[in-house]
Image (cartoon, helix red, strand yellow):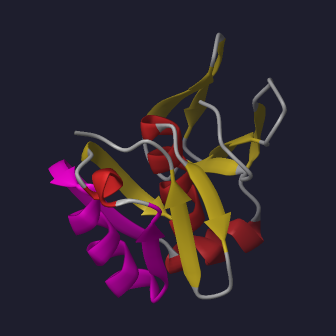
Amino acid sequence: MRAYNAQVQVLVKNGNVQFSKNKNQVILTKGQKGEILANVESIIKSEITEIETVEKEKFSSFVFNKKSLGEVSKALSERFGKKIKFSQDKIKNCKLTATFENEKLENIIAVIAETFDLKIDNQVDTIFLSGNGCD
């Protein structure tokens, strides 16, 4: 997976997760995390720290099944209290099917941006997503 202007991090609470970027992949197990940094090809695998365990309480879970990014942005904005705006309406038409279990907003946005080839401009109270969108 590639992230634009962001760090993507996966914390594993239960089970196993395959985390990949291009041809690099790792299997993460309970109590481990994987990180991808912008402009870095490798995946960093390590143990979850006590601080990260406490921070997980700030995360939320979402299940989106062919939901438009317009609907997704409303749900995320309501939960995290941050506006999500699009450079053009065509982006709102993109359909997302994904499950986010205990993820921070920044991680969810990074996955959405990667999925639809969008650029992220993260400001204090608003996230702007720009790109070609979907028909």
Q: Residue 105 location in percent, x, y?
A: 52, 68
Quadrant where the image shows the C terminus:
top left
**Outermost left residue:** 66
Q: Position of residue 73 (x, y in %)?
A: 34, 69
Where residue 71 sits in the image (x, y, percent)? 21, 66
| Above or below, comparing residue 80 to residue 133 in the picture | below
- Picture quadrant of residue 96: top left
Between 77 and 133, the one nearer to me in the picture? 133
Q: Is residue 66 visible?
A: yes
Q: Does residue 104 appear in this view?
A: no
Residue 35 point in image, percent of width and height: 72, 42
Please tell me whether residue 69 belongs to the stretch shown in magenta: yes
Q: Which residues are magenta?
A: 60-87
Residue appearing at x 72%, y 51% in the figure: 7
Taking the spot 61% from the left edge, 57% from the top edge, the residue there is 120
Q: For the point 59% across and 88% down, which residue is it? A: 125
